[in-house]
Amino acid sequence: MNRSRASTAMRIAVLSVGLALIALAVYFIAIGLDKADKLASVLSALTGLTGLALSWYATMRPSRSQPACPPDNEPPPAQAPPATREDGVHNVISGSVHGPVIQGRDFTGPLTLGPHPPPPPHDDTPPR
């Protein structure tokens, strides 16, 4: 849904709720204060119970951010405690990490990315 459709839908929803509230107020005035009070009490109780049921449902359903169990061929995602430094740097690793990970700042000296160079050959001849 793009932004203009979302804003149009929001405007229609706000307008609908506003019109419903105005119609309810007119109806309450027409039926009298005593009946309006009783009906408002019943509507409030139903609204409260509906909100309670929706909040219970929202807390009991599984989260959408992570699947309930990972597929068999993938390892579980890496979970590391958040690292926050004094300067406000906050590093987070999410998902599956395969292979070496290099992360840093202000490296000095020689830095080689990729496979390690082969070790130097050994001279097996005894010294003379």
Image (cartoon, grey):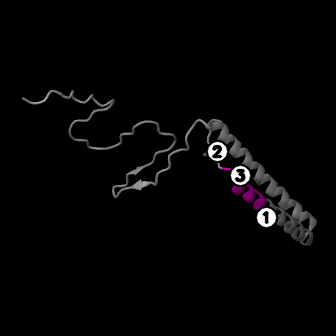
Check residue 61 in the rendering and tell me which mark sits there, or answer none. Answer: 3
Element class at badge 1: helix
Q: Find numbered disc 2 in the image and state the secondary structure of the residue it sits on.
A: loop
Image coords of residue 58 (percent x, y): 71, 55
Q: Which residues are magenta?
A: 51-62
Disc on res. 128? none
- Where's residue 15, x and y in %? 74, 49
29 relative to 101 in the view: left or right = right
Q: Which mark is residue 48?
A: 1
Residue topped by disc 2: 69
Residue at 77% x, 52% y: name it. Answer: 17
Closer to us: 27 or 37: 37
Circles 2 and 1, Cβ within 8 Å, touching? The answer is no
Instruction: Tell me if mark 2 has few (under 14), some (14-19) or many (20+) residues whose alpha carbon lies within 10 angstroms of its own.
Output: few
* Disc 1 residue type (three-letter): Gly
Label 3 Cα neighbours within 10 Å, binned few <14 / some 14-19 / many ≥20 = few
> Where residue 45 appears, x then y in whole percent?
83, 66
Q: Residue at x 71, y 52 (%)?
A: 61
* SS for callout 3: loop
Gap between marks 2 and 1 measured at Cα: 34 Å
Question: In 3D space, how far apart are the residues under numbered discs 2 and 3 (Cα atoms)?
Answer: 14 Å
Q: CA distance from mark 3 to mark 1?
A: 20 Å
Q: Is residue 20 left or right of residue 3?
A: right
Amino acid beneath label 3: Arg
Image quarter hosting the N terminus = top right
